[in-house]
Structures are given as structure tokens and as C-alpha cells.
Amino acid sequence: MALAAKIPFRHPYAAGFPGLGSQPVPTDADALDYLDRMAAADGASVEVGVATAVDAFFRDSKASGVFDALKACCILAGARTLAGALVPVVGDAPTNVANGFVSGDYSRTAGLTGDGTSYLDSGFAIDEPENYHQCAYITTKPTVNTVFVGSDNASQQRYLLYSNVAADETRAISGQTGTPYFGGSGSLEAGFKGVLRASASDFEARASATTSSVSSAAGDATSLNSFVFSNNLNGTSSGAGDAAIAFYSIGTSLSLEDLDTAVTNLITAIGEAL
């Protein structure tokens, strides 16, 4: 990474030094708004390399048509501080419940690492059970069973993306209690995990760059906010674990493959920039 890319993106010479050439800087209006809100929380703007990675995510996700489906979303990497990482891309800022996560839990490249008890309240409830998605980008797979994103009343409102450590597997449940998605051995490795529903009769889940469809009846709308790093089980945290998560989003139905591509490119580019 060139030294110029390490300059804060709001530096007067961020786009280039006189006589020494130029470099790309963010241009998407929504990306600039997000980056400036992050800078206000961090106390300083991020480097040009991080900012252009974020800008590319905004542009790519818009071009593929997935951006408008994001209703609650955080990039939990790249920011200079935990406060900056909790600035939302869209939607409400998550609640760091009882300030459970602290600065030592945050890495600019790996994201936020669970401690087995702390979690985020996304502030978003799945009110369209036949039109929703949940996703998380995992940078370190858990060593104990973990709900990456979830809400659950143990009946007709079950929306879970989670791990089974013994099987080395990502799993998901959507709607009514029934057959879950089984990602298969090895699907718990670092990377994008997602689940969506766009019909009453089946749902899709994705891990290890493979999307599968599962026959399962849709459930009911819920007033339970989805938790991140844990399950919201009737208003109480359950299944908190120790995965490291660098991105999450919750919202309406979209292309899991396109979101996977945009998020994977984003987290990879942030790592290269830092």
C-alpha cells in the first residue's frame, strides 16, 4: 500500500500532492456521508485506502441492487475506534448493550470479537417474514456455539443465523420451527454467511460461496429486534459466543451472492489498506 493511501481522506492533499501524481478518493455521496459520520465518532477521518474501500462497497452494492435492501447495517472494521465501527451504514445505530463491548474487543481488520456475553441490539425487527435477509461476515470462526444474528420466540418467529461448532457448520432457521439449513462440514470457516426469505414456502442460505434452498414454511412478523453476536430469545440474550464479525446487515430480500461479493471485497480491501 503506497504511503499516500495512508493519508486521512479529508486531508487537503488526499487526492494527490502537487507534482507527484494523484490517487482515487471517495466520490459516492452516501459513502461520504457515512465516512464523515464515522470520522465524527472516531475524532479523525480514516485513511484514503480505507475510505476508497468503503466507497467501492457503496458503489458496488448499489450497482448490483442490494444496497436498498439494507435496513440495519454496520461495517465493524476499518474505523479507527469502536465508536466509529458502531456508526451505521444505514438505519439506526446498534445498541452496545450495557456497554458490553470495549475497545480491546475491536480490531480494524478483524472487526469485533465476541466475549461470550456481549451483544449488539440492531434496533431492527423482521416485520416482513416473507421478505427479509440477515447476514454476517465472520473473520474468526467461533470456538463455542454462537448465534451470529437472530431473534426467536421459539414458535412462529424464528430468524437465526448460527454455528454448530461440533459439526464445523453454519446453520440457519427461518420462520416456523422446521428443517434448518445445514451448511455442511467446513462451512464455518471465515467468510460471508447469510439467510433470506422471498417466499412463503422456502428460504435460502449461503456459506462457503454456495447458496442453498430449504423448504420451510414462513413464520409470523416479529416485534423482537434482531441481536448480533447473540439471539434475542423472547427479549433475553441467548447463544452469545466468541466469533469475530466484521460486517452485518439485516433488511429485505436481496441476492446473497451479490451481497457476498460486495462485502468480501470490502473486508479484503480494508485489510490490504491497513
Image (spheres, grey):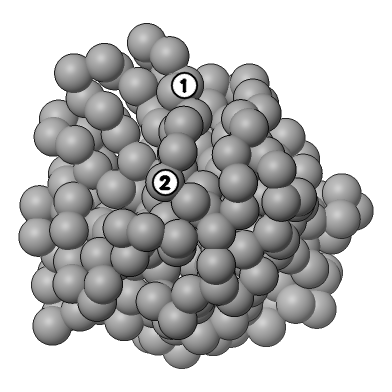
User: Which image quadrant is residue 201 in?
Assistant: top right
Measure how far apart labels 2 and 1 are at the Cα level.
Answer: 18 Å
The amino acid at mark 2 is Thr
Residue at left offset 26%, top offset 72% = 234
Q: Which mark is residue 177?
A: 2
For disc 2, the neighbor class at 10 Å (few under 14, some 14 to 19, many from 20) is some
* Mark 2 / mark 1, whichever is N-terminal: 2
For disc 1, the neighbor class at 10 Å (few under 14, some 14 to 19, many from 20) is many
Q: Secondary structure at mark 1?
A: loop
The amino acid at mark 1 is Gly
Please tell me whether residue 148 is drawn above or below residue 235 in the rendered image.
above
On the picture, is 206 further left or further right than 55?
Answer: left
Front-most of 178 and 80? 178
Residue 109 seen: no
Q: Which residue is mark 1?
A: 183
Q: Position of residue 73 (x, y in %)?
A: 54, 67
